[in-house]
Image (cartoon, rainbow, N blue to C red):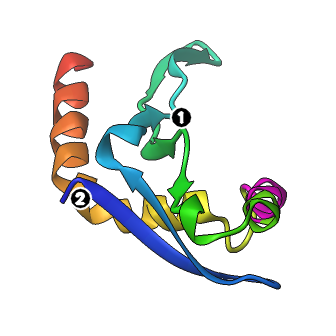
C-alpha cells in the first residue's frame, strides 16, 4: 500500500477523503540524547513518531470556494481533535510499524 487515506466529516461540506503517499511521511524522534543530571551521565533515546509534511484531497470534487473552506478547516484544526494530519498518521502506523521497530533496534545498537 503506497497511499494512506482518512475520511473525515467537515462542517458545511460533508465527508472529505484526505490522503498521503507513504513518501510524504518521515520518522522523527523527540529524544534529547546525552545529558548529565547531578553528575550522573544519562541518555534520553526519546520516542519515534510519524511526521507528515502535507496532505491531499481530490480537489476536482469540490468548487474553488469549498476547497478554500477545506484548507481553512485543515489549518484551523491542525494539531487538535479531528486533525486530518493525525488521522493519516494513525492510519499509517500499521504500514510503518515494522519499519519503526527496525529503526528503534538500529538506533539502540548505535547508542550502546
Q: Position of residue 60 (x, y in %)?
A: 56, 62
State the quadrant of the C terminus.
Answer: top left
In this view of the protein, which residue sits in the foreground, 26 or 23? 23
Provide the residue designation for mark 2: 95
The 10 Å Cα crowd at callout 1, few under 14, some 14 to 19, many 20 or more, is few
Classify 94 as above or below 34.
below
The answer to if 25 sits in the magenta stretch is no
State the quadrant of the N terminus.
Answer: bottom left
In this view of the protein, which residue sits in the foreground, 7 or 97? 7
Residue found at x 60% / y 64%: 84
Residue found at x 80% / y 57%: 68
Classify 111 as above or below 67.
above
The 10 Å Cα crowd at callout 2, few under 14, some 14 to 19, many 20 or more, is some
Helix, strand or loop at label 1? It is loop
- Whichever of callouts 2 and 1 sits on the residue coming sooner in the sequence is 1
**Count of numbered circles in the view:** 2
Which mark identifies residue 30? 1
Residue found at x 44% / y 66%: 90
Q: Position of residue 21 (x, y in %)?
A: 34, 48
In this view of the protein, which residue sits in the foreground, 102 or 11? 11
Classify 23 as above or below 88.
above
Helix, strand or loop at label 2? It is helix
Classify 36 as above or below 106.
above
In this view of the protein, which residue sits in the foreground, 25 or 74? 74
Q: Left or right of 71: which side holds 31? A: left
Q: Left or right of 62: which side holds 96? A: left
Distance (Cα) linking label 2 and label 1: 21 Å
> Of circles 2 and 1, which is in front?
2
Which mark identifies residue 2? none
Residue extent of the magenta highlight: 70-78
The answer to if 74 sits in the magenta stretch is yes
Amino acid at each position: 500500500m503506497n497511499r494512506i487515506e482518512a475520511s473525515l466529516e467537515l462542517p458545511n461540506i460533508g465527508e472529505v477523503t484526505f490522503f498521503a503517499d507513504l513518501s510524504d511521511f518521515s520518522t522523527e524522534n523527540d529524544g534529547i540524547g546525552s545529558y548529565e543530571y547531578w553528575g550522573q551521565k544519562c541518555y534520553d533515546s526519546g520516542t519515534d513518531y510519524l511526521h507528515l509534511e502535507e496532505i491531499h484531497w481530490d480537489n476536482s470534487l469540490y468548487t474553488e470556494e469549498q476547497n478554500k473552506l477545506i484548507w481553512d478547516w485543515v489549518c484551523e484544526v491542525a494539531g487538535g481533535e479531528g486533525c486530518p494530519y493525525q488521522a493519516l498518521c494513525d492510519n499509517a502506523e500499521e504500514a510503518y510499524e515494522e519499519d519503526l521497530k527496525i529503526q528503534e533496534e538500529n538506533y539502540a545498537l548505535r547508542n550502546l
